[in-house]
Amino acid sequence: MVAMPNGFPVVVVGAGQAGLAVSYELTAREVEHVVLERARVGQSWLGLWDSFCLVTPNWTMRLPGAAYSGDDPEGFVPRDEIVRYLRGYASSFGAPVREGVGVDSLEPGPGGGFLLRTSAGELRAESVVVCTGAYQRPHRPAIAAGFPRDVLVIDAQDYRNPAALPSGKVLVVGSGQTGCQLSEELHEAGREVFLACGRAPWLPRRPGGRDIVTWLRETTFFDTPLSDLPSPAARLGANLLVTGQRGGHDLHYRTLQATGVQLLGRLAGVEGHRASFAADLADSVAFGDARYADIRKLLTKQLPIKGIMAPELPDSPPFHADPPLELDLNGFGVVIFTSGFRPDYTNWVRFPAFDAMGFPLTDNGASRVVSGLYFCGVHFLRKRKSSVLFGVGEDAAIVAQSIAHHHRTAPPSARTRSSGHQGSA
Ligand SMILES: Cc1cc2nc3c(=O)[nH]c(=O)nc-3n(C[C@H](O)[C@H](O)[C@H](O)COP(=O)(O)OP(=O)(O)OC[C@H]3O[C@@H](n4cnc5c(N)ncnc54)[C@H](O)[C@@H]3O)c2cc1C
């Protein structure tokens, strides 16, 4: 462990893409800081399953000062290459990262500023930027506790590959990007797969021979702010269903059904060895079809304004299914929950700086409640793209600019006063 002085003007917590982008922007503005990472740079990507490939195309690896320079911008690099990109990025500007230092709590400092209790001791800071991930704590509905003991129940983050699972049928709960990708992989490995479906937008991967994310970049889709969503809770909704596997291909309800994955409604209950499912599969597919129609409308409306001809996107084909409403769990080896994530800040950030769902209350990444506290990399922090590789840089620059301004304009003693907190947990 590298010895650390006990204070920094700015501490960034987390060395994923958000923490590194903030560090790059602070470095560019000559703001002294340190980045504390409890594991290693790019740890969250390493935690994904073995065959994981980027879902957005390679060109989206464009953190500030490090645009994608490879020769396959619409390809999808595997997991370890994403990690290599992040580690190369960190060394390209000498990011002051301390790996292996976890922050256990962030509290008001005695006399102002912040106190961080870390695995390497206590640390003071005048400003703190929390970059601990867009997708933090796997969410399992309470029903999950009801599965019988002879069936292994795991979250997606514990899944590595089909061979590492116990034999038997597989129930995947949650049909977002991850649930669909794991269902496909397990089915191809010869498993009998049942997918309990929720609601998710789907789109073809390469309409008109171009990646869907590349098309959408030309519209306002990724710039959508939280306030444009139907409700704040909508930010917990699933992302677009597509995959980067095998060079990228369509992957959604209909493609999975066609290959032989048994689609089901939402998991509704578990009693002994019987699991029950809602009769809502058709509704979930209709929801996805409606989002497909919305996005098609957006493309056909906005692309021509830029002189781009929109790709042809046919109507959703009909969907027929008569899924069972109950399953006998005998013969099942594993249940995998892929039912989304929830924020996890309130466990360790001891300030009342969060909304009822646990998301930070911010303006442009600056806490509305605690002066000197910032966040970056949060899903919909400023826009839909705030948590993805090609969007986080914009937010990082804004956050770093605000910190630089704060540190330039306030003398050290006033800095401590001005980061006085308006309340504590
Ligand atoms: C399955 C999946 C697929 C995705 N695919 C794509 C994609 O194709 N394209 C795309 O652009 N985005 C994708 N994303 C979204 C997003 O890009 C990633 O979630 C990305 O990892 C977010 O970066 P981040 O820096 O905000 O958080 P993270 O990468 O999660 O980094 C946070 C870091 O903080 C550290 N940390 C956490 N708590 C502490 C603490 N208390 N003290 C010290 N360190 C701490 C963690 O170890 C971690 O390294 C995907 C997300 C998931 C879950």
Image: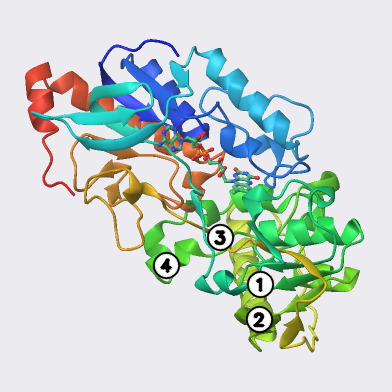
Q: Amino acid at mark 1?
A: Pro
Tell whether circle 1 marks a residue whose Cβ is less than 8 angstroms from ligand 1: no
- Image coords of residue 134 (percent x, y): 48, 47
The answer to which image quadrant residue 71 occupies is top right
- Nearest to viewer (mark 1 / mark 3): 1
Q: CA distance from mark 2 to mark 4?
A: 32 Å
From the image, tell me which residue sits under label 1: 148
Q: Secondary structure at mark 3?
A: loop
Q: Amino acid at mark 4?
A: Ala
Q: Secondary structure at mark 2?
A: loop
The vertical placement of 191 against 87, above or below, is below
Q: Amino acid at mark 3?
A: Gly
Q: CA distance from mark 1 to mark 2?
A: 6 Å
From the image, tell me which residue sits under label 3: 340
In this view of the protein, which residue sits in the foreground, 117 or 80? 117
The vertical placement of 376 against 413, above or below, is below
- Nearest to viewer (mark 4 / mark 3): 3
Tell whether circle 2 marks a residue whose Cβ is less than 8 angstroms from ligand 1: no
